[in-house]
Image (tube, rainbow, N blue to C red):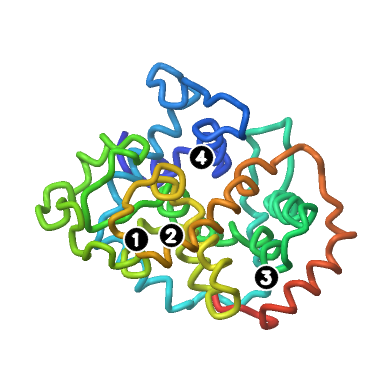
Amino acid sequence: MSDTAPANNPLRSLDDWEDFVEARYPAPGQKAKEDYRNYDNPARDTVREFYRLNHRHQTYDFVLQKKEEFLGFNHPKMTVLEAMDYLNKLVDDSDPDIDLSQKEHLLQTAEAIRADGHEDWFVLTGLIHDLGKILCLFGEPQWAVVGDTFPVGCAYSDKIVFHEMFAANPDSQVPAYQTKVGVYKEGCGLNHVDLSWGHDEYLYMVTKPYLPEEAQYMIRYHSCYPIHREGAYEYLMDDHDREMFAWVREFNPYDLYTKSSGRPDVVALRPFYEDLIGEYFPKELNW
C-alpha cells in the first residue's frame, strides 16, 4: 500500500488502536486475546497497516522535526473545554453499539478516577489525557498521533508490538542509532530521551507548566507500553523515572478499561469540571 494521503490514515477511527491495545493488555482476570497479531484476521488489517506506517516513518529526525514544528504552539489559543469540543470533530462512525463522543469518553475516564477517591489533579489528568489527539485536526496522519510510543535514536526493543516492521525504518540502517543506548547514555533518564511523536508528548508540552509532576508523567508516557507494561528500556531510565512510573501504571487501567456504553451527563458534570479546570489552568492554553 502506498503512503499517499488516504493510506496514511488506515484506521477507521483512533479508537481502533485503543481497542487493539486493550486486546493485548486485558483487564485483570481476563485473558489476552490470542489473535491480536494474527496476520490472517481481516479485522486486524487496518491496525497492522497503521503499525507499518508508524514503524516506517517514526525516525529520530522526524521526531525532532515535529517537536520544532508543533512545540512553538502556533495554533489558536483554546480553553480546555473548547479543546474538548474541538476534539469532538473526530467522529467515530465505525461502532454503532458505543456511539459516544470523544468528550464523553474523557468524562468516563475522569469520573471513574473521581469515583475511586483520587486527588483532584488525578481526576483532571483523566479528563484531559487524550486532548493531544487534536493533532489529527491539525492535519497530522494517524501514525503520528496515536500508537505505542518508544525511544528513537537507539536500538528497537523486541518488546515493541510488530517490532519486525522496523526493518523498513531508515534509522535501522544507521549504526549509531542501533546500539543499545544509541545517542543517549545509560541511566540518563527519560527526560533526555526522545520518544516517537504523538499526542502524549504534544499534550505534555502544552500542559507542563500547570500540572504536578505525577500528572506530567501520566500524560507523557501513558502510551509508552514498551516501558510501563513490558519493562523495556530500563537501562535508559533513572531512579526518579522508576519512582514516577508507579503513577503511570496506576493511571493505565483508567485509560484502558473505563470505556462503556453508559453516557455521562455532560451538562450536569460541566460545573464541577469547569471549577476543576480553573484551579489549574489559565483561561486559555497555547496549542
**Which residue carries the number 2 mark?**
242
Work out how far the residue at label 1 is from the one at label 4, CA to CA, in angstroms.
27 Å
Going by the numbered disc 3, the residue's amino acid type is Val
Q: Evaluate whether residue 138 shows in this view.
A: no
Q: Of the residues under marks 1 and 4, which one precedes in the sequence? A: 4
Q: Of the residues under marks 1 and 2, which one precedes in the sequence? A: 1
Please name the residue shown 56% across and 58% down the image: 247
**Which residue carries the number 3 mark?**
80
**Which residue carries the number 1 mark?**
237
Q: Is residue 152 above or below residue 73?
A: above
**Which residue carries the number 4 mark?**
17
Tell which tag, 1 or 4, sits nearer the viewer.
1
Q: Are the residues at dot 1 and dot 2 in contact (C-beta closer than 8 Å)?
A: yes
Comparing 267 with 94, the one in front is 267
Q: Badge 1, how many Cα within 10 Å: few under 14, some, many 20+?
A: many
**SS class, disc 1:** loop
Q: Quadrant of residue 95?
A: top right
Please name the residue shown 39% across and 59% down the image: 197
Work out how far the residue at label 3 is from the one at label 4, CA to CA, in angstroms.
24 Å
Q: Are the residues at dot 1 and dot 3 in contact (C-beta closer than 8 Å)?
A: no
Q: Is residue 60 left or right of residue 258?
A: left
Work out how far the residue at label 1 is from the one at label 2, CA to CA, in angstroms.
7 Å
Q: Is residue 253 above or below residue 136?
A: above
**SS class, disc 4:** helix
